[in-house]
Image: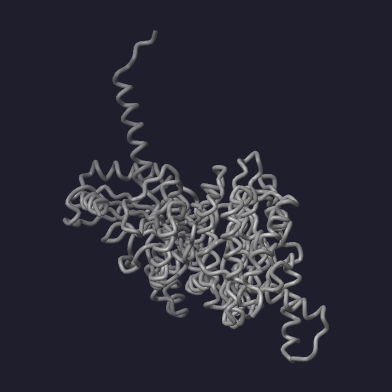
Amino acid sequence: MAELSVNELSQDLRNAIANLQGKEGLEEAGVVVRVGDGVAWVHGLKNAGYSEVLEIESEKGTVEAFALNLMEDEIGAVLLGDENFVKAGATVRLKGELLTVPVGEELLGRVVDPLGRPLDGGPAIKTKQRGLVEREAIGVMGRKSVHEPLMTGIMSIDAMFPIGRGQRELIIGDRQTGKTAIAVDTMINQARQKSGVVNVYVAIGQKLSKIARLVERLKEEGVMEQTIIVATSPSDAASLLYIAPYAGTAMGEYFRDNSQHALMVYDDLTKHAVAYRQMSLLLRRPPGREAYPGDVFYLHSRLLERSAKLSDELGAGSLTALPIIETQAGDISAYIPTNVISITDGQIFMETDLFYQGIRPAISAGLSVSRVGGAAQTKAVKGVSGNLKLGLSQFRELASFAQFGSDLDAETKSQIDRGQRLTELLKQPQYQPMGIWEQVASIVAVSSGAFDEVQPEKITEAKQALLAKLWKEAKKDMQTLNKGGKPTDELMQLLTDTAKAVSRAYEGA
Amino acid sequence: MAGAISRRKVAEYTAERLLAGDKDILTQLAAYLVQTRKVRTLELVVRDIEAALAERGVLVADVRSAHDLTASIKRELTAFLADTTGAKTVQLRESIDPTLIGGVQVETPSATLDTTIKHKLQQLKAAKQ
């Protein structure tokens, strides 16, 4: 055996240490040239990658930014922290990683900002995993077609525009037409029906008072334990508004990838596009239509493409998305609304006129559509709601005719009568999502003609009485119905008979 | 009209002329900057030229320390820089800054090495926040 040279060993060790220190020591660095409006221009850092995180030194520790403009002479980076601490001449280092947020069960019940920092005054959030904010959507082979229902608890949606798990259904309408209410009711219904679906609500530039009210409500309803709220306010930097939906999606994807189901609500993507427009213009990218940058379509398409129903090999989890878009004076042909309509698998269109006529939820039967949900609709509801949508759209058309007060033939008159009762039936107060059996029983009562003699203004009362009676007298049957299977003929007969019996008490003027 | 020439291109051309021993290049560059009203970007142009020179094997490094550096430390530093950046010649521009308390701060055109006590204290302070 060769003699071990201690001298050489110590020398080798010294060299190894020197090497280690050398690699650790000389860090690539750049300098901030200009800073303002949440954007820092950096000189140097030739090796910076797109969307890589930069660390800018300041008196108050490091401020993070991400590189979005990689140009020949300088880098345009969007600041994630307070720009007041960033000064021209500050040293900038590469963090060597892309933007990530904490993900996991630990986030349930919490209100966080887009970087995963708590906003609810609770303890710091420690998760085992972190997820990439910008992540590629799952490929073709990893997907399965949408086939399981996601019950919103809103009768007009579940009956006419059913939503499936993994679907992207846009909620679109003017301000104050109840868009958020639909999303919130859907979240509440997930807790009421114990569907196990996790809610992720992303508030993009929403008033903090509105978010606080929402959190209170969700706590009251007992939904908060299965909800994550990612909140940004109008006073946050545009960069935070921009990453909020991606960060929220990363949190939702954790559940999707672990064989669970999650529901994303993006409230709203109009503000998201506006925040991105601000960032792009400050980064001196050329403006296009309505001053939005050229990649504003990609901005939303890559976000919504991450919603998916996974194949069985990947655990069959799902991520459903309910993006919200606010229109101006009902104009759905503006730039952002048309973009998002074309990306999503259908839309629920809310109308101001209906809202002020007292028809709430103010869902337009003619303009709303669900492109993939039909395959996912609960058998029970599907069996009874057949031509509800057609009937309702025809009624709204006829009703505008009938206003002229001319004589109508019997058939038209009966169509209008049925339509009026249907419209009354589909009115539903906020925070009161309905179970499957309630929806089926109500629809059967009207569409079978059992409620034909009840005055339209008494439909709601009659419906309540019917539901109470059914629950009292046939609880077992209703529980079976609630499982979602196709109702048997006997059960249908029971529903019709009970409805007729209830109807008698409300007949006459 | 010819498009604007990027700063990097100007810097690379200047660096090449400097290495070729062209003495007039600085006058020409000055004239170019004045004519194109880019005198304000002088600092950045200088940095870019230094970076371009470093890419071509001539490294100029700023060395700041609290006290005078001994000849042996300078030798080691030069060797270390030549080794890590692959430069053929290394020039050190030294300056003394007592507020650094101890250690040494090296700045090359594209990288920094900060082993000063001031920097470590700042890091501690930031970590505490």
Q: Position of residue A71 (x, y in %)?
A: 51, 64
Q: Residue at x 64, y 49 (%)?
A: A477
Q: Is A486 in front, or is A239?
A: A486
The image shows residue A425, relative to residue A485, as above or below, that is below
Q: Is A277 in front, or is A258?
A: A258
Q: Position of residue A366 (x, y in %)?
A: 71, 74
Residue B45 appears in view: no
Q: Position of residue A246 (x, y in %)?
A: 51, 58
Q: Is B91 left or right of A175, judged from the image as shown? A: left
Q: Quadrant of the C terminus of chain A?
A: bottom right
Q: Is A42 left or right of A252, judged from the image as shown? A: left
Q: Position of residue B114 (x, y in %)?
A: 29, 50
Quarter of the figure with residue A409: bottom right
The image shows residue A17, relative to residue A268, as above or below, that is above
Residue A282 appears in view: yes
Quarter of the figure with residue A269: bottom right
Q: Residue at x 59, y 59 (%)?
A: A469
Q: Residue at x 60, y 49 (%)?
A: A479
Q: Quadrant of the N terminus of chain A?
A: top left
Q: Residue at x 59, y 53 (%)?
A: A473
Q: Is A373 in front, or is A99?
A: A373
Rendering colour mode:
one colour
